[in-house]
């Protein structure tokens, strides 16, 4: 983890395997511009890392999506 990246928050979210992850558009918490999302799925450990980045101010947010059964 990059501990020097202070302009970044990390959330941890738990999903049931029955749930679907809905693609969504969120506004930047800093400048209210649209954020771009990317997903890095790790199917073996059932974790999806969701990276959201604001193209305007560079604000990033990482969310770890854990599947629980
Ligand atoms: Zn922004």
Image (cartoon, grey):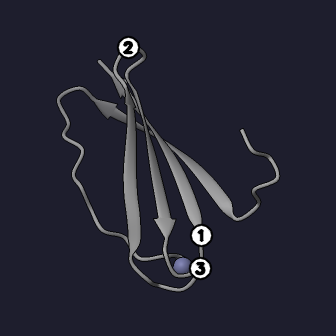
Badge 1 density bin: few <14, some 14–19, many ≥20, Cα 10 Å = some
Give percent across and percent down for residue 28.
Answer: 48, 76
Q: Is residue 66 above or below residue 13?
A: above
Task: Give whichever of 33, 14 is nearer the camera.
Answer: 33
Badge 3 density bin: few <14, some 14–19, many ≥20, Cα 10 Å = few
Disc 1 C-beta below 8 A from ligand 1 = yes
Name the residue carrying label 3.
Answer: 57
Query: Secondary structure under badge 3?
Result: loop
Give percent across and percent down for residue 38.
Answer: 38, 51
Q: Residue furthest right?
A: 4
User: What residue is shown at x 24% (from left), y 55% (from top)?
Assistant: 23
Label 3 to label 1: alpha-carbon separation: 6 Å
Disc 2 C-beta below 8 A from ligand 1 = no
Discs 3, 1 touching: Cβ within 8 Å = yes
Disc 3 C-beta below 8 A from ligand 1 = yes
| Sequence-earlier tag: 3 or 2 | 2
Q: Which mark is residue 34?
A: none
Name the residue carrying label 1.
Answer: 59
């Amino acid at each position: 983890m990059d501990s020097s990246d202070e302009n970044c928050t990390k959330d941890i979210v738990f999903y049931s395997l029955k749930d679907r992850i809905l693609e969504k558009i969120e506004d930047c918490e800093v400048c209210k511009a649209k954020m771009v999302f990317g997903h890095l799925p790790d199917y073996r450990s059932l974790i999806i890392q969701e990276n959201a980045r604001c193209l305007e101010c560079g604000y990033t947010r990482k969310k770890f999506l854990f599947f629980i059964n």
